[in-house]
Amino acid sequence: MDSKYPCMWPARLRYGLCDRKNNKRLALSDLVGIVLMGGKSSRMGTDKSQLLFSLRYNSDDGRITQIDPESTNSEVLSSSFLPPKEKNAPITLTELAHTKLKCYVDEVYFSINKNQEDLGLKNTILDEYEVEGPLSGIISALRATKRAILVLGVDMPLITEQSIKNLIKHRNWDLLTTTYYQEETNTWEPMLSIWEYETLPCLEEYFESGGRSIQKFLNQYGNQRVPIINKSEFINVNTMEEYKNLSLS
């Protein structure tokens, strides 16, 4: 066993988080949600986390309801944990991502940059590296929570609850991450992924050595690949044109 990379050891050996007598993982409530929203949004020209989605608040029953019943995301989502708004007030991409994660975890945090501190969000985690790509936000989140994290990028509004549930179902506790994978292009989809807390030492070593590519990191270490159910969900909204094409405005 290579002691140089202890983060590659099985989790039960590294941290003793296993019932050795019965060879079962202890039922730990360790997974927290992270809305990854601290990017520069340079191609968008404005903070895309505050763009509006085609959903509206329904103040009568405290839920978010869909405007267009034929839209891709037609499910009704709980919003009791979001700031109160007037009836029919629009929902931002940040609020949408938060809502979807909250269906599966008790705690959700917002990974932000310094320019987003005045948004008035609670449970924020400031990117320690002043926006060095998604890896810096993930490292900051792991350090702050000291727990495994369920990451959802704020710019992926078409992700369904089914895909989140399927990812959690396929979680591999003894690998660094559980991530959707595009077989056709041989690329990872890390903006919906699970990162074990034990990943942190390897991430820090990679980052401090100059590594910034999340794809290269995932290729370098052992990770759980999850086949994508519907690849049309994994669309990033990076430009205003993409935003308008998805009919989100």
Image: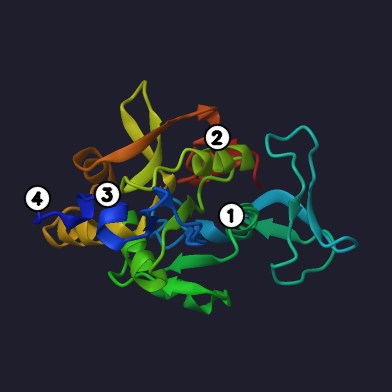
The residue nearer to you, when weighing 190 against 103, is 103
Q: Amino acid at mark 2?
A: Glu
Q: How many marks?
A: 4
Name the disc covering residue 2, or none: 4
Identity, as a three-letter code, of the amino acid under mark 1: Leu
Residue 75, percent across and down? 74, 42
Question: Dot 2: what SS?
Answer: helix
Q: Secondary structure at mark 3?
A: loop
Circle 3 is placed at which residue position? 10
Q: Which residue is mark 2?
A: 233
Measured in 3D between alpha carbons, the distance from the residue under mark 3 to the one under mark 4, in whole angstroms, is 12 Å
Residue 36 location, x and y as percent?
Answer: 45, 58
Mark closer to the chain start, 2 or 1: 1
**Position of 146 relative to 153 (above/below):** below
Question: Regarding mark 1 in the picture, which secondary structure is present there?
Answer: helix
State yes or no: discs 1 and 3 in contact (Cβ < 8 Å). no
Which residue carries the number 1 mark? 101
Q: Residues within 10 Å of mark 2 (few under 14, many from 20)?
A: some
Q: From the top left corner, tell me how far across and down residue 91 is, in percent.
A: 69, 58
Alpha carbon separation for disc pair 2 and 1? 16 Å
In this view, the residue farthest toward the front is: 21
In terms of depth relative to the viewer, which is nearer, 142 or 110? 142
| Farthest-out residue, top | 184
Residue 192's place in the image compared with 12, above or below, is above
SS category of the residue bearing label 4 = loop
Decide: marks 2, 3 in contact (CB < 8 A)?
Answer: no
Residue at left 19%, top 59%? 207
